[in-house]
Amino acid sequence: MEQKPLRDIVEAALLAFGQPLSVGQLREMFDAGERPDEAELRAALAALAEDCAGRPIELVEVASGWRLQVRSEFALPVSRLWQERPGRYSRALLETLALIAYRQPITRGEIEDVRGVAVNPHIVRTLSERGWIRVVGHREVPGRPELLGTTREFLDYFGLRGLDDLPTLAALRDMDHLGVQLEFGEVMPVVEPVPESAPEPVAAAEAAGPAAG
């Protein structure tokens, strides 16, 4: 298939679907006899990303695949199209989220040890309801407390592909709203891991705000 028609089909699919699409999902749009190979699709994606240069939208790769989204500098005015305003998250929630992201798997007790205060159950419930964290296993200590980790949905929401996209701890320490110190300790053994529905590894990062799409 010629490159331009393939690029245009990919763009149309990403606009219509409204969610990230993997290369495998994009290939499934075509009949078996006309199905482009992975290299052709990646070339089409690269061409589409180049076409987006200088436009108010951009093509980004996240944990679940590729998506078209509004560039951050246009997110605020565009967000006013929706009556419901995104919630503002407390310092306690952001610190809890950052600890889970950088020290996962982690228990509530370990979070409390670092922050010096009890974890509000509402914070964990809010993060779970957003689909940003999940129970990934249990610590092999008395009481076998739950281990918390992050999800693919969280990666997608903040426009991240994986752990390698996390900002450095030094950068986080420079942020005014994240004063908590995130020193890494010895990794303890984990038992009874609970697999997520998707096969790839999952992780997350705390970010300044959601990606607009």
Image: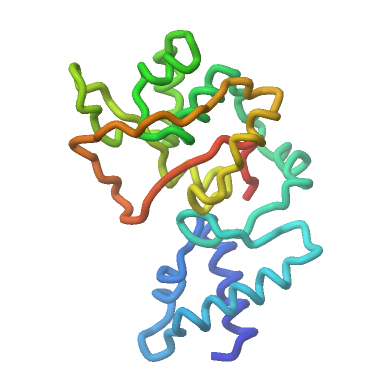
Which coloring applies here?
Answer: rainbow
The residue shown at (67%, 69%) is 49
Q: Position of residue 143 (x, y in %)?
A: 19, 17
Q: Nearer the viewer, residue 165 or 199?
A: 165
203 lies above or below 19: above
Residue sitting at 58 percent across and 79 percent down? Answer: 43
Residue at 58% in and 21% down: 180
User: Residue at horizontal 37%, vertical 28%?
Assistant: 106
In the rendered view, tell whether residue 69 sits above or below residue 109. below
How far across and down, in percent of the image, does residue 92 sit? 54, 17
Outermost residue, top direction?
117
Q: Quadrant of residue 7?
A: bottom right
Residue 93 shown left or right of residue 77 in the figure: left
Q: How many marks?
A: 0
Q: Nearer the viewer, residue 40 or 118?
A: 118
Image coords of residue 182 (percent x, y): 52, 27
Q: Quadrant of residue 12?
A: bottom right
Farthest-out residue, right: 54
Answer above or below: position of 152 versus 101.
below
Compare residues 64 and 129 and report the one nearer the observer. 64
**Which residue ends up furthest to the front in the rendered image?**
186
Tell me where residue 174 sits by quadrant.
Answer: top right
Image-based side of 164 in relation to 191, left or right: right
Left-right relation of 126 to 209:
left
